[in-house]
Structures are given as C-alpha cells and as structure tokens.
Amino acid sequence: MKKLFAALVLCLLASPALAQVNMAGAEFATSGTRSKIPGVIGSDYVYATNSQIDAVMQKGWKHIRIPIRHERIVNGLMGDFRAADIAELDRMIARVISNGGSVNIDVHNYGGFKFNNTDIGYYNHNRTGATNLPPDGIVDLWKRLAERYKSLTAVSFGIMNEPNRQSASEWRVVADAIVAGIRSTGATNLITVPGTSWTGAHSWMRSGNAAAMQSFTDTNYAFEMHQYFDADSSGTSADCVSATIGSERLKAATEWMRAKGAKGYLGEYGVADNPTCLAALQDMATYMRANADVWMGSAYWAAGPWWGNYKYSVHPPRGANQTAVVLAAPLPTPDPTPTPDPIPDPTPTPDPIPDPTPDPTPAPAGKCSMAVGAFTATWDCVIK
C-alpha cells in the first residue's frame, strides 16, 4: 500500500501546477455552541504563524487560500479594520508572497453576517429569525480589502465562502454588487465567484447556479466551486462513494463552463487517508489536468495549526499521502492573450549577416519588495 501512495504522489506531482491549500484557523468558533463572535485571537481562533506557513509551503503548497471572517476583520458590518486582525492578515500575505507563493483571500461567511453569537442576517434573503441584509455591508468590506491589496497581483479575492440560504437569483444580485464594488477601486485582481447551495460543482446545474450565472461576466474572474467525495458531498465523512466520483461530480459543471467560455476554481476538496478516497482524488486530478482549459486552480481543505487529528488535514506532519493532492496540476493557466502567428512577408529576403556583437550583460538578480500594511513582502526578481 505504501508503494501505491508513493506512486500517487509522483503521478500528481508530475505536471506543473498551482498547488493551493486552505490555511484554516481565522474562521474557527463561529457556529453552534462554540460560537465566539468576534472572539479572541489565540483563544477562539488563530492566524498561522510564519513558521507554520513555512512548514506547509515547504511541502509543496505554494499558494494559500486564507479564510477570514467579516465580523473579525472589521468592526461591525461596515466599520474600519480591526487593528490586530488586519495586521495578522497582512503578515500572512507578506509571508506567502516572500516564499514565492500567492494568496486567495476567502471571506468565510456562508452568505451572512453574525451580529453576535446568535443573531444573523443573510444578504438579499428573507428568512424567519434572520435579517434580510442589503449587499452594502459585504460590498463595503470588499472595497476596503481591494483598496488595501489591489497592488499585489499575487492576491486574488474569494468574495464569499459557500452561500447557502439565498436562491441562485438572489445570490447573483449580491455577487454582482461585490464585483462592481471591487472594480470601482481600480483593482484588477482575479475574483473567484461562488454560486449558492454551498457552491457545489455536483449541483451547479440543478441548483439554479448555471442559469443564474449564465450572463455573468467580468474582466478577470473564475467561478469558485467546491467538491467533496462522500455520499452527500458535505465533506463530513471519511468514506468516498467510489474511485471515480471526483470526475463524475465535476463533469456537468466543466462542460457548462467550457460552453460559456469561463474558468473554474475548485476552492475546497479533501479526502481521508484511505485507498478509495486517494484513488478518487487521483481520478479528479487526472480529469482536471485533461480539462485545464477550464480548471485554472484548486485549494485542498485543509492545513492549519489547530486541526489536530482532523481526517482531511495536511498540516505537517499529517497528511503526507493526501499531499499527493498537489492536484493543482490542473492548473497550468492558459495564456489569456496568445500571440497570433505572424503574417509572412510575401517576398522574403535573406537576413543580413549581422556584425558580431557581444552578448548583452544580463540584468542583475536581486530582491524586490512591497509593503503589506506594516509588513514587507520580499521576493527574488530581476533588477532592470
């Protein structure tokens, strides 16, 4: 069995890819009896330290999806940034970029906002016992985040994790407002746009997401979908339906995106360490590589320092076998502006033999840097 696992790792690492993983922690303690809103950093929720980020990235996960909570990153629904939380987010982003990676900021709020541990509102949705919130609050948050990080091309914006109360048409109104708000800041960063119904790839067609999002367009976006392999696609079981369930559940959404000319980003997926699930993961990896014209990225669920014995964890030292999931091999991103073939000269003439000239002196290698809040991201670059 160990040889099977090793072969799986090599198979999934064989192609160049965007190997992304969720670095969970800042979204903890926000549901049920354990809910602490906003809570205390280090007691109720956590941001990964630099050494923890390094340990994960050294395993091959070069791109990090960072879940955050609306209620913690700003004061109230439309308030200023909370100093301690935004400083932690700045630090994490700076560290990932300095390590040669990129970041997807994920607002992990499920389409709503908690005013305290019990009262909740949902954006553009009426529900008994909950407030129908206009999109203004989440738009305000994203305008603040976009203004702060728009100069960092290595940062993309995941506008909402798993909306699930709104209908597809209700959620489309909210998504449109958020995207318009981000673009109003001048930000050109990639935006990952989910659907409703937990944004499942398997249910994208029947949930109404395909119909609602058919006319969606933007200058730089991908549809964010999530997919798990257990019986109800919830990601709560250690069991997977079959060795081919991954490709089967992605197929319809993949074909829809291709027909629309859209890209996809698989923002969550994960498996337990058992033969059927690892085979299902390999199956999905193979399928996504074969459909790399559609799938531009993925992020495994999850790493993070507080997972303990969580069955899907790939936080070192756990998850050596699932780290085969460097499945982001689906993602050699196609060149968005391919260069057309040159029109040949109808009467070509031989090129003159140039005078020999010395090779130009190569530009010196060095370090580039950029401020991220109070922190500095530094990376290798060519100085021109």
Image (cartoon, rainbow, N blue to C red):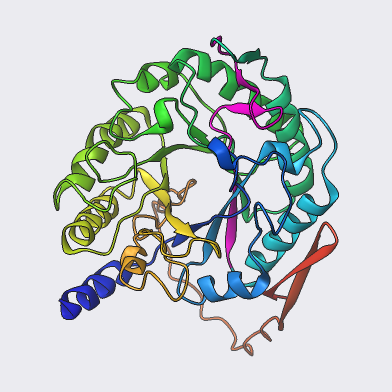
Q: Is residue 111 visible?
A: yes
**Is residue 290 shown above or below 94?**
above
**Is residue 295 shown above or below 11?**
above
Image location (x, y in percent) of residue 281: 25, 56
Quarter location, residue 204:
top left
Decide if residue 29 is on the left or right side of residue 361.
Answer: left
Image location (x, y in percent) of residue 171: 52, 19
Residue at coordinates 68% horizontally, 62% vertically from top-left? 92
Decide if residue 65 is on the left or right side of residue 188.
Answer: left
Residue stretch rendered in magenta on the structure: 101-127
Residue at coordinates 61% horizontally, 19% vertically from top-left? 123
Quarter location, residue 376:
bottom right
> Which residue lies most toward the front here?
33
Image location (x, y in percent) of residue 164: 46, 25
Image location (x, y in percent) of residue 21: 47, 58
The residue closer to the viewer here, 60 or 234, is 234
The residue closer to the viewer here, 374 or 370, is 374
Q: Residue 17: say if magenta.
A: no
Q: Residue 123: say if magenta.
A: yes
**Is residue 17 shown above or below 112?**
below
Residue at coordinates 42% horizontally, 31% vertically from top-left? 198
The residue closer to the viewer here, 298 or 41, is 41
- Count of labels shown? 0
Residue at coordinates 79% horizontally, 63% vertically from top-left? 370
Q: Is residue 31 visible?
A: no
